[in-house]
Amino acid sequence: MGHGRRLARRLAQPEEHSARLILRSAAAKPDALAIIALAVDSHIEGVGTLEPRVPIAADAWVEVELPTEGEPPPLAIDVYSAVGDEHARLTALTLLARLETATAWNLRPDFAY
């Protein structure tokens, strides 16, 4: 596939909006994804890839961002939406409530960006 065709396909993808939750506990990325998937009755897509994610709604998914090597937590849980910023934030807050009910995690929204 030529460079132009790859670029056109990338540009044709829907715009992604995101909202971030901060987990103030230590957790490994695979464990965090598994816990999120269990809490929302979903699964992990892209296991073994660089960008695994958990679908949490028709147009929303979660990715986990680890601190850079050697840094302590927090762990970032990024909620993405193809619908818009408000949908991403509402979905993130719904996820936060579900995770705090289902786990002992201490989370906070980080919607400053």
Image (cartoon, rainbow, N blue to C red):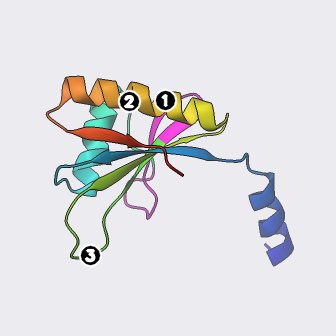
Residue 24's spot in the image, x, y percent? 22, 49
- Amino acid type indicated by mark 2: Leu
In three-dimensional space, the C-alpha distance between marks 2 and 3, rounded to whole angstroms, equals 26 Å
Residue 46's spot in the image, x, y percent? 45, 52
The secondary structure type at the circle numbered 2 is helix
The range drawn in magenta is 46-61
Residue 57's spot in the image, x, y percent? 52, 28
Kindly check if marks 2 and 3 are in contact, taking CB atoms under 8 A apart as contact.
no
Q: Which residue is mark 2?
A: 95
Kindly check if marks 1 and 2 are in contact, taking CB atoms under 8 A apart as contact.
yes
In three-dimensional space, the C-alpha distance between marks 1 and 2, rounded to whole angstroms, equals 6 Å
Callout 3 crowding tier (Cα within 10 Å): few <14, some 14–19, many ≥20: few
Q: Is residue 103 left or right of residue 4?
A: left
Quarter occupied by residue 92: top left
Quarter occupied by residue 42: top left
Residue 91's spot in the image, x, y percent? 49, 29
Q: Which residue is mark 1?
A: 91
Q: Is residue 25 left or right of residue 18?
A: left
Q: Is residue 12 left or right of residue 15?
A: right
- Residue 81's tag is none
In three-dimensional space, the C-alpha distance between marks 1 and 3, rounded to whole angstroms, equals 29 Å
